[in-house]
C-alpha cells in the first residue's frame, strides 16, 4: 500500500495550523518529517500521523507543557489508529483523537479533490493553476473570496464553476503555494469587480473569460 506524505504547506492547510507554527513544531522536534532531496533542495515530508498531531496542536494541544506535547506526538506516531491518548504524569489528561482524525480525513479528501480538479500546465496561462477544462485561475477565485465576494456572486460571473470548486480555492492556494518569482496575477492590481456586474457583461456581450482579461494574460 502506497504511503502518502504531505508537504508542510499541505499539512498547514488541512490541519488548520499556520505554516510558521508548523515549522516551529518541526524545529522543536515534536515531529520529525522525512527529508526528501529534490535537486539541490531538501523537502520535508510529513506522514498522516504527523499531520494528525498538527491538527491536535491547532485544537489546543499547543497550550500544554512541552513534555506533554512531546508525549502526545510520540504516542500518535507509534500507535496509528489510536482513539485517545492518556497522560498520567502529573494531572491525568485525556486527549480525544478519533473525532479529530475524522475531521482530518474530510480535509484530506478535499485536498485530494482540489488536486484533481485544478491543473498546472506551463502551456496554459504561463503555468497559472486553473480549473480543469477552463482558463479560470484558482488564485483569482481565492482572492475574490478574500475580498468578500459571496460564492453565489462568483457563480453568476463564472458559470463554468460550481460551489465545490469555489469552496476548494482557498484550500488549494494555501496547500500549493507558488514558488520562485511572484505569481503572475494581473487582476490583483485592479479594483474588485462585483461578480454580478461581470455576469451581466458576460450575458450582454457574450464575452469570454479570455477577452475580459488583458491580452498578455490569455496565455
Image (tube, rainbow, N blue to C red):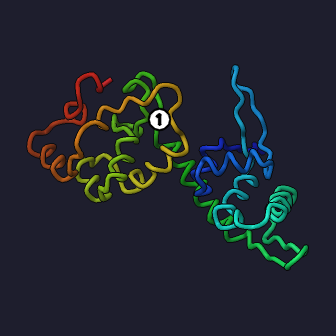
Q: In the figure, 59 relative to 191: above or below?
A: below
Residue beneath label 1, please? 119
Residue 83 left/right relative to 17: right
**Residue 205 at x, y percent in the picture:** 9, 39
Q: In the figure, 143 relative to 184: above or below?
A: below
Dividing the picture into quadrants, the one containing residue 138 is: top left
Q: Residues within 10 Å of mark 1 (few under 14, many from 20)?
A: some
| Residue ranking furthest to the left | 204
Dividing the picture into quadrants, the one containing residue 129 is: top left
Depth check, front residue: 25 or 55: 25
**Residue 2 at x, y percent in the picture:** 75, 42
- What secondary structure is marked by label 1? strand
Identify the residue at image location x=13%, y=39%: 206
Identify the residue at image location x=83%, y=59%: 70
| Residue ranking furthest to the right | 89
| Residue ranking furthest to the front | 65
Residue 169 left/right relative to 87: left
**Residue 113 at x, y percent in the picture:** 52, 49
Q: In the figure, 216 relative to 147: above or below?
A: above
User: In this rendering, does residue 24 appear at all?
Assistant: yes
Callout count:
1
Amino acid at each position: 500500500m502506497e504511503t502518502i506524505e504531505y508537504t508542510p504547506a499541505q499539512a498547514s492547510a488541512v490541519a488548520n495550523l499556520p505554516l510558521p507554527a508548523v515549522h516551529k513544531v518541526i524545529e522543536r522536534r515534536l515531529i520529525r518529517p522525512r527529508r526528501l532531496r529534490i535537486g539541490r533542495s531538501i523537502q520535508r515530508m510529513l506522514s498522516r500521523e504527523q499531520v494528525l498531531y498538527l491538527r491536535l496542536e491547532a485544537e489546543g494541544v499547543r497550550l500544554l507543557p512541552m513534555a506533554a506535547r512531546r508525549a502526545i506526538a510520540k504516542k500518535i506516531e507509534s500507535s496509528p489508529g489510536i482513539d485517545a491518548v492518556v497522560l498520567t504524569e502529573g494531572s491525568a489528561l485525556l486527549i480525544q483523537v478519533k473525532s479529530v482524525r475524522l475531521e482530518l480525513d474530510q480535509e484530506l479528501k478535499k485536498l485530494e479533490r482540489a488536486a484533481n480538479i485544478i491543473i498546472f500546465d506551463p502551456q496554459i496561462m504561463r503555468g497559472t493553476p486553473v480549473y480543469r477544462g477552463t482558463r479560470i485561475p484558482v488564485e483569482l477565485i481565492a482572492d475574490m473570496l478574500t475580498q468578500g465576494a459571496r460564492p453565489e456572486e462568483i457563480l453568476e460571473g463564472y458559470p463554468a464553476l460550481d460551489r465545490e470548486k469555489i469552496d476548494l480555492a482557498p484550500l488549494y492556494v494555501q496547500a500549493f503555494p507558488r514558488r520562485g518569482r511572484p505569481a503572475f496575477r494581473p487582476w490583483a492590481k485592479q479594483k474588485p469587480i462585483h461578480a454580478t456586474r461581470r455576469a451581466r457583461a458576460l450575458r450582454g456581450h457574450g464575452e469570454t473569460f479570455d477577452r475580459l482579461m488583458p491580452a498578455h494574460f490569455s496565455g
